[in-house]
Image (cartoon, grey):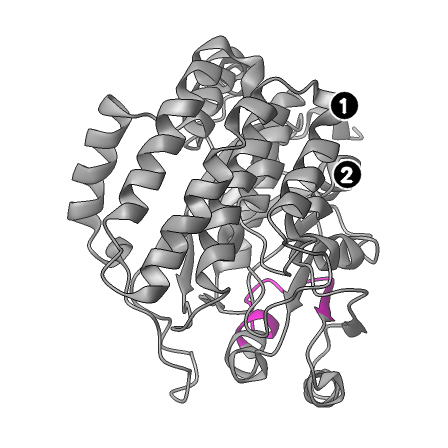
């Protein structure tokens, strides 16, 4: 008897692509790209979108790797130094069912892709619009020993972070997480009905991101978030929130391990760093999260708390500049809160112009 393929118990195999956006980070690409090419479950293609000052050197290195790999490896010159724009540019090249967007300093373990794809393949009805990898704090042993130094971070102390996150969630909860939790409550039963038991998460971090390609292509990264200085922040959470708003869940793949080899150094000048951490969060909130009354009420309190945290870092000139930038963005809160969804982008642009942050200003380091 011919089996009914529509009710077969085996998961339908899916293919996937990888898009890496980068700028002036060839030393890190030399470590991360070989790990992506050596996955136990190979990608259908890898697309590198680069806007380095020396693009020719990046292209030469990528093409040298391509000659020894069975995986198609494309390298394209980015239209602009803008992380969301570069990711969107790479996304147009993807034909595979799933697309992952590791940062150029995301170090994958040999089975990271296989673990991600197992989640998608278990989800036959497409409940999951995105799947997050899981951060670990020890690099894969396969990583090249000459990898660049990594910046220390509070996240390297998981026990401390768990306590901090618990306290903050009680006292000053993140609007992003409040909205995500509400969407999980609304949509989670659908996954449970399908027999899915992977953890569901409220947001997704940039270096952990993967999406169903049709979902990512239909929503796309918001290029406004990286349009001013090339430094984009919260563009990852913004896309994840819009996936949830569109009726899809974000699952986590607990064994899809990623080590974030975050480079030390400043990714933007102090004022711009503080300014866009607050303004981009505000913009993403009022664009999507504010649909939840509870999350909307939490926006002012949370942003004021973030500015307070920056005030504790005023011991040096850079820290004082960060605080000044965050304060400047916070003054725009009433303006953004009163904007209609259709006018938010215009308000965002006007606020940047008023603070003298022009579209032509770019940072020279890593795009985030």
Q: Where is residue 175 in the image (x, y as percent from the top left)?
A: 43, 25
Query: Pointer 1: what residue?
Result: 342
Sequence-first disc among 1 and 2: 2
Number of dots carrying numbers = 2
The quadrant the C terminus occupies is bottom right
Q: Is residue 185 above or below residue 100?
A: above
Q: What SS does tag 2 mark?
A: helix
The percent position of residue 157, horizontal first and vertical second, equals: 19, 55
Residue 361 image offset from top left, x and y in percent: 67, 64
In the image, 184 versus 350, the foreground residue is 350
**Of tags 1 and 2, which is closer to the observer?**
1
**Snapshot quadrant of residue 358:** bottom right
Q: Give the range drawn in magenta.
A: 35-49
Q: Residue at x 72, y 34 (%)?
A: 345
Q: In which quarter of the image is residue 145?
A: bottom left
Left or right of 178? Residue 67 is right
Q: Residue at x 53, y 74 (%)?
A: 32
Is disc 1 surrounded by few (<14), some (14 to 19) or many (20+) residues within 10 Å? few
């Amino acid at each position: 008897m011919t089996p009914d393929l529509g009710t077969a118990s085996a998961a339908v195999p899916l293919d996937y692509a990888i898009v890496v956006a980068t700028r002036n980070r060839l030393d890190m690409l030399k470590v991360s790209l070989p790990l992506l090419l050596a996955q136990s479950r190979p990608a259908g293609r890898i697309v590198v979108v680069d806007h380095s000052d020396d693009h020719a050197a990046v292209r030469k290195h990528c093409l040298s790797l391509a000659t020894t790999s069975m995986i198609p490896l494309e390298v394209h010159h980015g239209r602009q130094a803008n992380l969301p724009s570069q990711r969107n540019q790479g996304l147009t090249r993807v034909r595979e069912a799933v697309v992952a967007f590791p940062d150029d300093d995301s170090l994958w373990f040999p089975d990271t892709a296989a673990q991600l794809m197992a989640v998608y393949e278990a989800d036959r009805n497409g409940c999951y619009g995105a799947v997050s990898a899981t951060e670990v704090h020890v690099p894969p042993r396969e990583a090249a020993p000459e990898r660049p130094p990594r910046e220390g971070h509070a996240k390297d102390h998981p026990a401390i972070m768990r306590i901090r996150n618990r306290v903050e969630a009680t006292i000053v909860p993140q609007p992003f997480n409040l909205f995500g939790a509400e969407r999980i409550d609304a949509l989670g039963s659908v996954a449970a009905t399908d027999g899915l038991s992977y953890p569901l998460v409220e947001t997704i971090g940039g270096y952990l991101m993967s999406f169903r390609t049709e979902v990512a292509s239909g929503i796309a990264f918001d290029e406004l978030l990286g349009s001013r200085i090339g430094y984009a922040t919260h563009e990852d959470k913004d896309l994840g929130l819009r996936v949830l708003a569109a009726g899809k869940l974000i699952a986590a793949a607990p064994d899809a391990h990623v080590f974030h080899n975050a480079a030390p150094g400043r990714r933007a000048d102090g004022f711009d760093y503080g300014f866009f951490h607050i303004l981009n969060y505000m913009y993403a909130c009022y664009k999507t999260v504010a649909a939840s009354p509870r999350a909307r009420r939490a926006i002012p309190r949370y942003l004021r708390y973030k500015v307070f945290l920056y005030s504790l870092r005023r011991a040096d000139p850079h820290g004082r500049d960060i605080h000044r930038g965050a304060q400047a963005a916070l003054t725009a809160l009433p303006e953004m809160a009163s904007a209609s969804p259709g006018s938010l982008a215009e308000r965002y642009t006007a606020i940047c112009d008023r603070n003298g942050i022009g579209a032509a200003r770019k940072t020279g380091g890593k795009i985030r």
